[in-house]
């Protein structure tokens, strides 16, 4: 199989890469890439817990936002630091990064569902589809030799920024939904449902395109030579 070509197409890819490399160049040598991997996992766990606790007080949404920033640093700096120091372990890093990404997505998504701002079923549907899109990216890297991290112009960093913006709006303008989930017709649930539909559409469209491309590369009936 072809060696995957890393493609960064989302809006903040260029500025983010420059910022991360600048930070990585200033990190003391005693801090290693694995330290930042652990930091990212702990921050994701904390963010999920903060979301779950937000049903008791909107202040937890501010904590969730702060932990999303820490999670971004941990998730992004481990690989960047390895590249800057020329200590990359491609297979180890690839495996560890995507396993921790899956965990982070699941724990943050579950926390959002337990916050009662968004119905748990919708939050979990969003998690399943996000993981499905991620799995599709990993499969594309192997069968097409293309490792495209984002879909269109939106990647993980943009998703975190959207979450932080929503946290801010909810903390400032929305009452804490103690005791029960908000109605399915609430703005939060309608927006989440639209995101679910959008992600499902993206996954189906990318699946159809990839199957079409692969069918042409490997036709079922080969011509006789």
Image (spheres, rainbow, N blue to C red):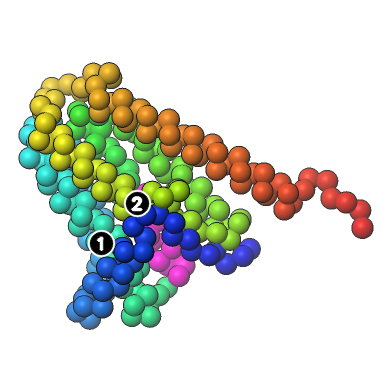
Earlier residue among tags 2 and 1: 1
Residue 94 falls within the magenta-colored stretch: yes
Residue at position x 58%, y 61% in the image: 145
Q: Does residue 20 appear to the left or right of 167 in the view shown?
A: right
In the image, which residues are magenta?
Answer: 90-103
Q: Position of residue 224 (x, y in %)?
A: 91, 53
Residue at position x 11%, y 41% in the image: 60
Quarter of the image with the C terminus is bottom right
Q: Does residue 185 appear to the left or right of 5 in the view shown?
A: left
Q: Position of residue 178 (x, y in %)?
A: 11, 25
**Residue 82 visible in rendering:** yes
Q: Quadrant of residue 180?
A: top left
Q: Position of residue 108 (x, y in %)?
A: 26, 43
Which mark, by number, is residue 156? 2
Q: Residues within 10 Å of mark 1 (few under 14, many from 20)?
A: many
Look at the picture and state if 150 lies above or below 182: below
Which mark, by number, is residue 74? 1
**Residue 54 visible in rendering:** no
Q: Quadrant of residue 192?
A: top left
């Amino acid at each position: 199989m072809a060696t995957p070509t890393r493609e960064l197409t989302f809006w903040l890819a260029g500025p983010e890469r420059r910022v991360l490399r600048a930070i990585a160049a200033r990190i003391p040598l005693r801090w290693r890439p694995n330290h930042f991997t652990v930091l990212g996992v702990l921050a994701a766990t904390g963010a999920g817990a903060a979301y779950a606790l937000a049903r008791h007080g909107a202040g937890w949404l501010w904590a969730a936002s702060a932990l999303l920033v820490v999670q971004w640093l941990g998730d992004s700096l481990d690989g960047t630091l390895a590249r800057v120091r020329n200590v990359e372990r491609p297979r180890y890093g690839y495996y560890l990064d995507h396993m921790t990404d899956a965990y982070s997505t699941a724990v943050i998504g579950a926390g959002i569902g337990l916050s009662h701002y968004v119905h748990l079923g919708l939050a979990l549907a969003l998690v399943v589809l996000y993981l499905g899109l991620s799995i599709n990216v990993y499969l594309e890297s192997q069968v097409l030799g293309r490792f495209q991290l984002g879909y269109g112009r939106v990647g993980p960093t943009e998703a975190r920024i959207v979450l932080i913006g929503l946290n801010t709006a909810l903390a400032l303008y929305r009452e804490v939904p103690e005791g029960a989930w908000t109605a399915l017709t609430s703005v939060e649930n309608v927006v989440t449902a639209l995101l679910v539909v959008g992600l499902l559409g993206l996954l189906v469209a990318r699946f159809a395109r990839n199957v079409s491309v692969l069918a042409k590369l490997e036709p079922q009936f080969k011509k006789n030579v």
